[in-house]
Image: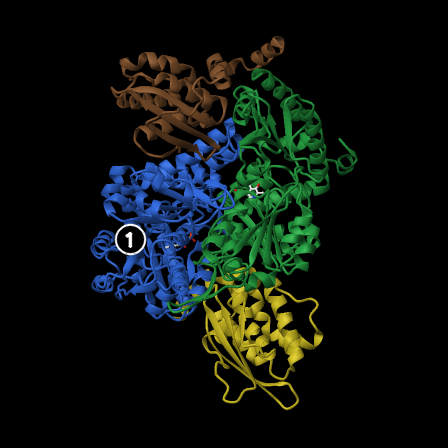
Chain colours: A green, B blue, C brown, D yellow
Amino acid sequence: MNDVMAATGFDVARIREDFPILRQTVRGKKLVFLDSAASAQKPRPVIDAMVQAMETQYANVHRGLHWMSERTTEAYEAARDAVAGLLNARERAEIVFTGSVTGSLNLMAHSYGRGVLKPGQAVLISAMEHHSNIVPWQMLRDERGIELRVCPISDAGELDMAAFEALLADGKVGLVSITHMSNVLGTYTPAERIVALAHAHGAKVLFDGAQAVVHRKVDVQALGCDFYAFTGHKLYGPTGIGVLWGRRELLEAMPPFMGGGDMISSVTYERSTWAQVPHKFEAGTPPILEGIGLRAAVDYVQAIGYPAIAAHEAALTEHALARMSAIEGVHVIGRAQDRGGVVSFTLDRAHPHDVATLLDRQGIAVRAGHHCAEPLMHRLGLESTARASFGIYTTTEEIDVLADTLTRVREFFA
Amino acid sequence: MNDVMAATGFDVARIREDFPILRQTVRGKKLVFLDSAASAQKPRPVIDAMVQAMETQYANVHRGLHWMSERTTEAYEAARDAVAGLLNARERAEIVFTGSVTGSLNLMAHSYGRGVLKPGQAVLISAMEHHSNIVPWQMLRDERGIELRVCPISDAGELDMAAFEALLADGKVGLVSITHMSNVLGTYTPAERIVALAHAHGAKVLFDGAQAVVHRKVDVQALGCDFYAFTGHKLYGPTGIGVLWGRRELLEAMPPFMGGGDMISSVTYERSTWAQVPHKFEAGTPPILEGIGLRAAVDYVQAIGYPAIAAHEAALTEHALARMSAIEGVHVIGRAQDRGGVVSFTLDRAHPHDVATLLDRQGIAVRAGHHCAEPLMHRLGLESTARASFGIYTTTEEIDVLADTLTRVREFFA
Amino acid sequence: MSGEHESGGTMFDDLRDLYQEVILDHGRRPRHMQRLARFDATAKGDNPMCGDRVQVWVAFAPDGTIEQAGFEARGCAISIASADLMAETVVGHNKQDARALFASFREMAKTGACPDCAPALEPALERLKPLSGVHEYPSRVKCATLPWHALAAALDDVKEATSE
Amino acid sequence: MSGEHESGGTMFDDLRDLYQEVILDHGRRPRHMQRLARFDATAKGDNPMCGDRVQVWVAFAPDGTIEQAGFEARGCAISIASADLMAETVVGHNKQDARALFASFREMAKTGACPDCAPALEPALERLKPLSGVHEYPSRVKCATLPWHALAAALDDVKEATSE
Ligand SMILES: Cc1ncc(COP(=O)(O)O)c(C=O)c1O
Ligand SMILES: Cc1ncc(COP(=O)(O)O)c(C=O)c1O
């Protein structure tokens, strides 16, 4: 499809064979799954890893002195190594497992927000955040008097960097918590510049990488950020597991979030002491099977390689933008220079929900709604959009089917 | 094995066939898995349900307008119905999914503890709680000045009900949060009496049913309690999912815990409003695959039936107590009248860790340590115990293997 | 243009059970999409999951029957059409009948039919029938029922309704 | 009694690589399980995962070598034996050598061997060899290394160590 992909031997047909669900039909039509940004499908190795654990090697982890527990602990902790490798974390102990990226962001809002930030300080987000990176900070604001600042975006859907710097100017911002890639507009935010500016003004930086990590190599040391969060199920892994990476010294300075088994060093009624990171933040039986599945997903993605994935998805996105822009009445929402494989759009005279239903009738799965980003919708003067999003298994042909069908949908509502 | 079981057609050999892992060997020996209280093994239908979802019917839930999302939403929400049925909840909306029972208890400590209880009020736990039902309340105490009271237990490991009543007497206790079955002693607490006394003194009751729900029918309406929590992976379901049941009006009066997608009604920067229960408490992409697995587990357990399960496990426990008490130097810890399938013990001259390792060498998996119940260990004057725990697939022969091997272990350290 | 329309129509023939002409028509050109100048009850309806929002106004005749109904809404073709057909069909019914009509309609939207529906409501239900196709699209059922939730709230003197 | 012992022994023959006679012996009758009356350094070690706890005391000779070591511990046979053998083998080593010995021992406990170990430490390591069997029991490795963590903390003038 292009040079990088040829060079990397990327073969979408072969990849599709790893995803059993893609052979399904929906309403009598071949499934065209363009909703990966909501949750990605699972490849064979992820399914197999979870099944193999349940069938041959499973017990609770960490405290067991018996063989099954030791092996399961190894398998689960190998997920930490895999994720540390994925993000190029300095140490495996910097990888905290949560239930989802929403869980990671709430952990941050509680432990960093309530434990490290002080009333009078501010948290800076952007105008294109997912609710999961808005509401926890709002709750923090309302409870603790920590200001919530919102960096505006341009009409193209890019961060207004002048405003960003201005919002940092008074030095009150203690934490910048910002999306690394918008789930609505596809925009990649300029991570290195964000970090440089934030650090220059004494703020730490947390990226919501739920979308970003799916499409491109993320190297937290190269980015220079302080925290990075993502969610397993969008990276071809299972539901029920999320990740928070943080610099060790920052994690160590944070109080725990949830209390319970595994996160303690010792417990008496008077006083409990906490385990070392990352365990301090992992209360209770962790998502064991999910960790095992996530590890398989990370290995799968790494084996394909981000250069090939990024090239494939860039080609798809370019093709989609070209095809959809050519359809009369279709408006692509978001025109950022630097973008990932997510295309939001509206269609004149047709509500996005009706568009989604008509596409679904043809086996095409797209999402329609506010995409958990109501304030962004308000900013755009919209109530909802339809959104097609791409994964490693998406093909040019599928995008052609979408575009062709959209033309018909337009006619249906003409 | 006994009349109830004969009457119910309980057949442990047939049940074992549903658990592929039980055919494994460990260190060259047949696996004898006696660590189900830490986490239970998974039957075929649970594995199959999760695989089937990943292979044929998966997408993110709740907001999708397309077929895959609708079907996945149905499958996930069916788990809520199944759990509502399991607990005999009045309504499905009273079932909240979390990441584990630890997640459920932390939700309670945050939403009920910080949102409903007032400084000056108290939370009453018992002397035989799991850390997950201690630490969250401790954190609440230290942060919000809500007193933490601990009801003592007898040497047999039963709740001291006179003390319990006395601790309620001043009317300050707003919430009793107590185990329904001890994971160390096996003790079932007298739930109805606890509820009656607590309610008479104006306190609500939350049961930690992590162990209890595995062995016996739990009917929250019959118990009369206000909240009930358990964890999926101990009930033959997947990791990564927990349950909190609460009376609707109580859940409605509680503020949300985590913020994010799915738990909101509307979001603006100024103010967000919350979704109805249970969604108010379920921020972010929920444990979809785990819900699907849990539903299969609940159906599996219900199909066998609690009368048969309880009878089977009562017989096993009785047999285990008899055999182990007969071994010189073995001390069974906990002699409650009303107990479930968990037997803790110590062995003279041998540390529980060494005991566990020697048993493991023979393929026998038991747990050794403080079982996430350090304060209980202190109460018992111990640092750790070994613990054998039973599930629906445990056999009398396995208990005989344990007892015979323990005799050898004793000799080894003699 | 009509040729194009037909090709769209051909591809989506199966969808005609959902998007019947009457729905497309009422969705595009609702007759009752207006705030009533004089009204006795009003309520909002809100579907947080998809962002649909509707407000319904009702005016009663002296005999307690609904004299007029109007609405303002943002939402899809189905919700607009449903609100419009609702505003049309509830006229002449008293509160109790309007509630019964809602119950029957909800049943129809969820299952495609309403075998036990009151014969007295037959004519009104017949008019609402084009919306029964939603039952095959579970996530769209709420689009059709949201205006009715708002109406019920107005009749009950509640200010807001949510379609769960 | 010795017959019984043997039958236990037979069943657990495979375990003899872990529970060698010297370990059982030092586990049962530790020689150095005592708080030193006079000491120059002390530290605690704590394994929260299993509840093992140890305190180590060290006294130095004027030339900076370890003159005497003692400990108090609660824990399993392996941790007691390891603490006792440690207290025995570190005597005569200076801080640097004691740290090197720890590094070598840790390697041995984790992998069963220490091919790159300093030849100068050979005699001490030979004495510790019976503990190398733990490498087959990952969850028990910490039992063997915890006293060493505490020793290292004492040498570094840190008050507490945790075996992660
Ligand atoms: C009584 C009790 N409460 C709470 C827990 C914690 O369960 P989880 O680790 O699944 O949150 C357990 C099990 O470890 C338990 O036995
Ligand atoms: C940018 C972004 N942040 C956060 C989330 C929330 O992810 P989850 O629902 O897995 O917690 C999503 C996806 O829904 C997302 O796209």
| Residue B313 appearing in the image | yes
Q: Residue at x 49, y 56 (%)?
A: A110
Residue C15 in the image, given as x and y percentages of width and height: 51, 16
Residue that sits furthest to the bottom in the current view: D62
Q: Which residue is mark 1?
A: B205
Residue A75 in the image, given as x and y percentages of width and height: 56, 51
Seen in the picture, residue A217 relative to A394 is either above or below; the reply is below
Residue that sits furthest to the front in the current view: C37
* Residue B245 in which image quadrant: top left
- Ligand 2 sits in quadrant: top right
| Residue B14 appearing in the image | no
* Residue D127 in which image quadrant: bottom right
Residue A169 in the image, given as x and y percentages of width and height: 65, 57
Label 1 secondary element? strand
Between A130 and B324, the residue placed more toward the observer is: A130
Quarter holding the N terminus of chain B is: top left
Q: Residue at x 43, y 29 (%)?
A: C54
Between D91 and B110, the residue placed more toward the observer is: B110
The residue marked by circle 1 belongs to what chain?
Answer: B
Mark 1, ligand 1, within 8 Å: the answer is no
Between B266 and D20, the residue placed more toward the observer is: B266
Seen in the picture, residue A411 relative to D118 is either above or below; the reply is above
